[in-house]
């Protein structure tokens, strides 16, 4: 038996490219409320490298960059990545933003230290 590999509507990059502003205004505030709690638990340190996969318009990436972390944000949508770059420039923080499939991380991305280890072991 073979499972079809067709992408679901929310996995189709072109659909997100057309909804960047809507995503930032509607979905980001909801997801960022949870992301900020997780980011606080990470206790990121200045210079620590983190990877934000499926970064959307960059709300969580910006919050992590505010801690002094060196952030790489990836998303499948080039329009989302462009929004992240504009927001990072406006906030005067450095975020390396790349359009790529989060399921096909290259070797450089996989070398980042995973701060989630600390999250899982923090009380």
Image (spheres, rainbow, N blue to C red):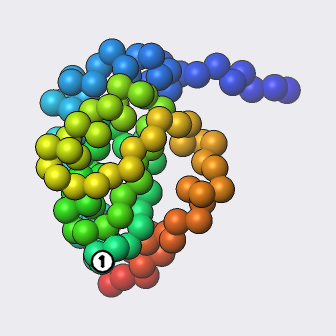
Frontmost residue, 31 versus 47: 47
Q: Quadrant of residue 77?
A: top left
Pinpoint residue 28: horizontal percent, then vertical percent.
22, 39
Q: Is residue 86 above or below residue 117?
A: above
Residue beneath the point at 27% across and 24% down: 20
Circle 1 packing at 10 Å, graded few (<14), some (14-19), many (20+), is few
Which quarter of the image is occupied by the N terminus?
top right
From the image, tell me which residue sits under label 1. 45
Q: Please state which of residues 3 and 25 is positioned toward the viewer in this rendering.
A: 25
Query: Is any atom of residue 30 visible in this view?
Result: no
Q: Where the C terminus falls, by quadrant?
A: bottom left
Number of residue marks: 1
The reply, left or right, for residue 61 in relation to residue 10 is left
Q: Residue at x 22, y 68 (%)?
A: 67
Judging from the image, what secondary structure is the residue with disc 1 in?
Answer: loop
- Residue 63: where, in percent of width, then height? 22, 57
Q: Position of residue 82 (x, y in %)?
A: 32, 31
Residue 42, picture quadrant:
bottom left
Which residue corresponds to the image point at 60% horizontal and 42% vertical from the top-left? 103
Position above or below: 117 against 80: below
Residue 6 showing in the rendered view: yes
Which residue appears at 45% of the width and 41% of the height? Answer: 98
**Image: 7 above or below 102:** above
Residue 106 is left or right of residue 47, and the answer is: right
> In front: 80, or 90?
90
Location of residue 116 (image quadrant): bottom left
């Amino acid at each position: 038996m073979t499972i079809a590999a067709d992408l679901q509507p929310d996995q189709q990059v072109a659909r997100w490219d057309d909804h960047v502003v809507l995503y930032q205004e509607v979905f980001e505030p909801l997801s960022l409320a949870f992301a900020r709690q997780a980011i606080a638990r990470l206790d990121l340190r200045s210079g620590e490298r983190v990877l934000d996969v499926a970064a959307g318009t960059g709300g969580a990436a910006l919050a992590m960059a505010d801690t002094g972390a060196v952030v790489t944000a990836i998303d499948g949508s080039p329009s989302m990545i462009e929004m992240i770059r504009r927001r990072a420039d406006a906030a005067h923080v450095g975020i390396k933003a790349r359009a790529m499939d989060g399921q096909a991380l290259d070797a450089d991305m996989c070398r980042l230290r995973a701060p989630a280890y600390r999250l899982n072991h923090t009380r």
